[in-house]
Amino acid sequence: MKLLGSTILAAAFGGEVRPRPDDLTGSEAKCQPDAERDSFTAGKFPDNFKWSFATAAYQIEGAWDADGKGKNIWDTFSQTDGNVQNNDTGNDACKSYYNMVRDVSNMKSLGVKDYRFSLSWARLCPTGKCKDASGQEKRGIDHYHKFLDLLIEADIEPFVTLYHWDLPQNLETTYKGWEGAQVVEDFGDYARLVFSEYGSKVKNWITLNEAEVVCDLGYGIGVFAPGKANLKSQFDCRHHTVLAHTKAYHIYNDEFRATQKGQIGITMNTDWYEGFDESKDNYDAAQRWMDLQLGFWADPIYLTGDYPESVLKNNNDTILQRFTAEQIAQNKGAADFFGLNHYTTRLVTDGNAAGENKGVDWTQHTCPQWPQAGSEWLYSVPWGYKKLLTYIHNRYDSEQYPIYVTENGVSSRGNGTDFEPELDDQWRIDHYTGYIGQMKRAIDEDKANVQVYTAWSLMDNFEWASGYTERFGMVWVNFTDPARPTYFKDSALFYSDLITTNELQCSDGTNDGTCKAAPTTTTAQTTTTSSAQFVSFSALFFLIAQFF
C-alpha cells in the first residue's frame, strides 16, 4: 500500500510543498464537479468477470520467526525504533499464519471466488537461497500447501504473488539485495521452486508487486525497508526488478507452462497524471511522470522491450543501466496480462514549484475539492481511474494483454489500539462504487479489456511504515486482542453482493444505467487538507507519491 505525505517527499528531493499560488488557476474545471465526467455506469459486468480480494504475507501473517522462517528486510526495518509509526511491527500482524481457517471462512461467507495473496520468500528459503533442498524450509513449504488446499476446498481460486516487498535479509546483507545483479538469479531459483511446488494448484501468478515502491522508497529515500537513500541504488533496483520479472516469466514459460497451463504477469502501480490545464508543456510533463512510474516497467514488458524515450533521455548510463539487445528481446512480451494497482490522481505542471527548470522538473497538484481518505496521499478521484484504464488499453493493447486490476481501495484512520469495531463505512462503499463505476465506463465506452477487479484489502493489516494507523480492510481486525477477532464492515457486505450478482448499483440502490458521482465528503480521516498542494521533483531525483 502507500503512506507518506507530500512534505516528506519534497524534503527528500528538494522540492516544495505550499498552498496553491495565485497564478495557477487554469485548472478549476478539473477541480470542480462535472456531471458528465463524474457520473458512472451501473448494471451488469461482462460474464466471467472476476471479483477478488488481496493481501500480502508480511502485512497479515505475523509468526515472523516461526517454523524456521528466516528474517526479511521488513522484520529488520520494523524492529528498528523510529522506522514505523508508534514503533509498530509486523511480528504478529493479523496472525493469519495461525488463522488460515478463519480467513478462508470469512471469504467463503462473503462468497469470494478469487483471492490474491503473497508468499513469504524467507519462509520458504530462510536465507533466500532456494536452488537446492539444503536452502529450503519444509515447514514453510507445507504451510502454503495447507493454505492452498483450504482455498481450493472452499472453491476459491488462488492468485499468488511471489514477491510483495519482504526480501530475505541475508540477500540484502550479502550483496545489497535489489542493488545486486545476483538477485535476478536468486529470484529465478525461488520462482522455480514455487512453480514446482504449487503449480498444480495455482494457475495465476504475479512475479512482483509494485517494484517502483520497493526501489524508490526502500533504496531511493529510505523510508521503507531496507532503509537506503541513494539514487544509483534506486535505479539499480529498478533495473534488476525488470530483469527478475523477465527471468521468472521465461522459467515458467519454458519449464512449466505446457504441463501446468497457467498464466503469469507483473503488478505495477500508478496514479493517473494529466496536465493541470490543456497546454502542451503540462501535457508533456504529465507524460514524463507516467513514463517514470508506469512506463519504466510497462514499456519494456508490453511495448518495446526497452525503457521509455523520456526515461533514457533524462537519465544517463552512470545512473540507469541499459538493457542489452538480448535483454530487450527477452523483456518484450514477457507477460500474459497487465497487472494494475491504482488509488488516486494528480494534476501536473511543467517545471518546479517556482516555474523553473521546465522540460525536466514537474509539479504535482491536488484539488481541495477532492475528498481525502485516511491516508495523507489518497484522494478520491474516480474519473481519473477511467482515464488511466483507457490509456493502458490504447498504449499497451489490452486485447493482447488483458487488464487485471490487482489492487484498488481506500483507507480510514486508526491507531491500532481501538477495540470497538467501526463497521459503518458508507463512505468506503461510495468510494468503491465510484471507482468501480468508472471502470465499467472504461469497459463499456472505451472497450478497455478489464477482466479482474481486486479490492485492497480483505482485512485491516500492518500498513508498512504507517503501522496500524491506517485501515484499508473490508473486514475489521481487533489488534488489541491476542486472538485477533474479525468483523465484517458494511463495505464487505456491499462487495459480497457485487460478487454474487456481478452487478453494480448506484449509491441510492438503483441500477438504471447512470449514477451520480459519490459524495464529495468523507469521514475516513480525522484531519483534512483544505488547500491544494504542489510538490516539485527533478527527473533525476524523483519519488512517486504512492505505494502499497
Image (cartoon, rainbow, N blue to C red):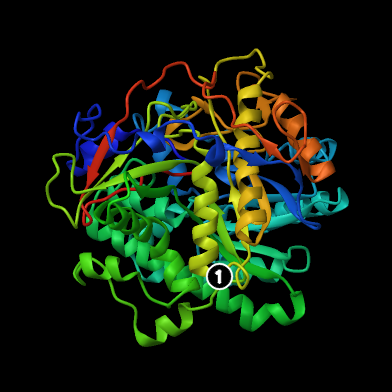
Residue 330 position (above or below residue 282):
below
Q: Crowdedness of circle 1 by 10 Å Cα count: few (<14), some, many (20+)?
A: some
Image quadrant in which you'd find residue 517: top right
Q: Residue furthest bottom?
A: 326
Q: Is residue 526 left or right of residue 283?
A: right
Closest to the observer: 410 or 346? 346
Name the residue at 44% across, 56% down. 211
Residue at image x 27%, y 36%?
A: 534
Residue located farthest toward the top when viewing the structure as drawn = 420
Q: Which residue is mark 1?
A: 397
Q: Is residue 71 visible?
A: yes
Q: Quadrant of residue 170?
A: bottom left
Residue 52 vertical position relative to residue 327 in the rendered view, above or below? above
Give the image location of residue 402, x and y in percent. 63, 65
Q: Position of residue 437 (x, y in %)?
A: 65, 42
Q: Is residue 235 left or right of residue 504?
A: left
